[in-house]
């Protein structure tokens, strides 16, 4: 952020992009990328944008991990010998709403 601020100051003094890049010790391509990403933003907005991008990346990683875990659990459940099925007992039964447990293929 400091280099970006300094780049703005040097640009206001009338230096060219190549001169600014040389002064800051970065490439002209880096200067171009900064302008493309943060052009027209003040420093606070640029910091907030970077923070939000970091949070977004973290949330995407968490979601991907959760989806992988769900897929793994589905694969395990597919081969499990226990089925849990909800059965609605007869009308008026004292056990209304309770499920039944069926065990398949256990010798």
Image (cartoon, rainbow, N blue to C red):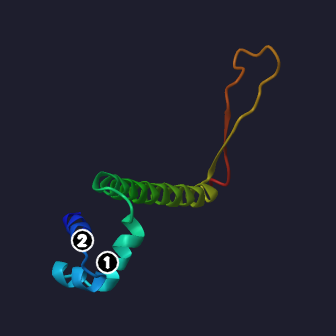
Question: Within the image, what quadrant is residue 13 found in?
Answer: bottom left
Image location (x, y in percent) of residue 53:
39, 58
Are the two marked residues, 1 and 2, in contact with CB atoms closer than 8 angstroms?
yes
The structure residue drawn at horizontal position 31% and vertical position 79%, both measured from the top left corner, is 30
SS at mark 2 in the image: helix
Instruction: Report crowding for label 2: few under 14, some 14 to 19, many 20 or more residues within 10 A (C-alpha).
Output: many
Q: Is residue 64 left or right of residue 94?
A: left
Check residue 78 in the rendering and tell me which mark sits there, or answer none. Answer: none
Q: CA distance from mark 1 to mark 2?
A: 9 Å
Residue pictured at 43% horizontal, 54% vertical: 59
Q: Is residue 3 left or right of residue 55?
A: left
Q: In the rendering, at what x and y percent does residue 90 appear?
A: 82, 22
Residue bearing mark 1:
31
Left or right side of 68 for 15: left
Q: Which residue is mark 2?
A: 7
Residue 19 x, y percent position in the rendering: 23, 84
Q: Residue furthest front?
A: 14
Front one among 8 and 104: 8
Query: Splitting the image into 4 quarters, where does residue 107 fall?
Result: bottom right
């Amino acid at each position: 952020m400091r280099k970006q601020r300094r780049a703005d100051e040097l640009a206001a003094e009338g230096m060219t992009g190549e001169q600014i890049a040389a002064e800051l010790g970065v490439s002209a391509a880096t200067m171009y990328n900064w302008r493309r990403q943060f052009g027209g933003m003040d420093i606070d907005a640029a910091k907030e944008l970077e923070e939000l991008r970091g949070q977004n990346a973290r949330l995407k990683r968490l979601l991907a991990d959760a989806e992988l875990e769900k897929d793994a659990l589905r694969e395990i459940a597919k081969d499990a010998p226990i089925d849990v099925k909800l059965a609605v007992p007869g009308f008026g039964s004292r056990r209304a709403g309770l499920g039944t447990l069926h065990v398949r293929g256990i010798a």
